[in-house]
């Protein structure tokens, strides 16, 4: 079946899971998860695949092996289009609503070094600054792991010091679960945001991973 929106039951499911993150709750509501969360997300990403590429839906289970937080289930459902390793487009539903994002989420130390070298260089750094300025002016927020202080080798008065502090960088926007979220309008709203994130993703693909964005 085609995508018709995110049911209100999806948000109720996650409200309940936040209150009772247990195997008992998940088992009791597994059919609700499949019908109200996983099914609509698969339908949504399938319909967006022709323009943006195939998405991977993340498993609902948390990896608690190395975490102090031993709650077993994620309190959101995310899907990621991996254009290059760690770089791509993301959509998520949770009790808070609908969230979309695009950028780079994980970087090894050598990748962080390439990112900062490209930010430092005037031609490429100013291009990224122009992209991020346009995104924030359009109402999108910049996220990512950041140093609290300046990175080693750079001065506090560097014209792009805020970008240089980033170890990961992505733009995103959250929509509350208003009435339109329960309709097929979600598909175009997600597509609009992903198109807006395109210049950031392209810059990252070109300068962090060292290759152009794959043609589709």
Image (spheres, grey):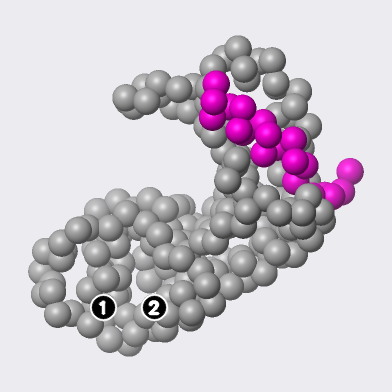
Give the class, few, some or many, for how many residues have Cα within 10 Å of label 2's Cα (few <14, many ≥20): many
Q: Magenta stretch: residue 33 in it?
A: no
Find residue 128 and name its label: 2
- Indicate which label's residue lies in the foreground, 2 or 1: 1
Q: For the stretch drawn in magenta, what is the main secondary structure?
A: helix
Specify the quadrant of the image occupied by residue 166. Answer: bottom left
As drawn, 117 above or below 83 = below
Q: Specify the quadrant that holds the N terminus.
A: top right
Residue 5 magenta-drawn? Answer: yes
Q: Which residues are magenta?
A: 1-20
Residue at horizontal 32%, vertical 24%? 68
Furthest-top residue in view? Answer: 24
Q: Is residue 211 visible?
A: no
Asked whether the viewer can see residue 129, the reply is yes
Pinpoint residue 81: horizontal percent, then vertical percent.
Answer: 59, 53
Q: Secondary structure at mark 1?
A: loop
Give the image quarter of residue 41: top right
Task: Say which residue appears at 48% left-offset and 28% top-offset.
Answer: 62
Residue at 70%, 21% (x, y): give it.
Answer: 29
């Amino acid at each position: 079946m085609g995508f018709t929106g995110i049911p209100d039951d999806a948000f109720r499911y996650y409200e309940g899971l936040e209150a009772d993150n247990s195997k008992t709750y998940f088992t009791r509501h597994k059919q609700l998860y499949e019908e109200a969360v996983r099914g609509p997300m698969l339908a949504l990403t399938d319909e967006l695949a022709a323009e943006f590429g195939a998405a991977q839906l993340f498993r609902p289970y948390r990896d608690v092996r190395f975490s102090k937080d031993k709650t077993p289930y994620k309190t959101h459902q995310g899907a990621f289009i991996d254009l290059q390793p760690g770089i791509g487009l993301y959509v998520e539903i949770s009790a808070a609503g609908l969230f979309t994002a695009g950028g780079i989420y994980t970087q090894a130390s050598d990748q962080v070094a390439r990112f900062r070298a490209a930010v430092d260089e005037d031609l490429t750094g100013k291009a990224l600054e122009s992209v991020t300025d346009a995104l924030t002016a359009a109402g999108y927020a910049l996220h990512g792991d950041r140093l609290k202080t300046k990175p080693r080798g750079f001065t506090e008065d560097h014209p792009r010091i805020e970008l240089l502090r980033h170890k990961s960088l992505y733009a995103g926007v959250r929509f509350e679960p208003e009435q339109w979220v329960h309709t097929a309008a979600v598909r175009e709203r997600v597509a609009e945001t992903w198109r807006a994130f395109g210049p950031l993703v392209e810059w990252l693909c070109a300068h962090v991973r060292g290759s152009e964005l794959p043609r589709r």
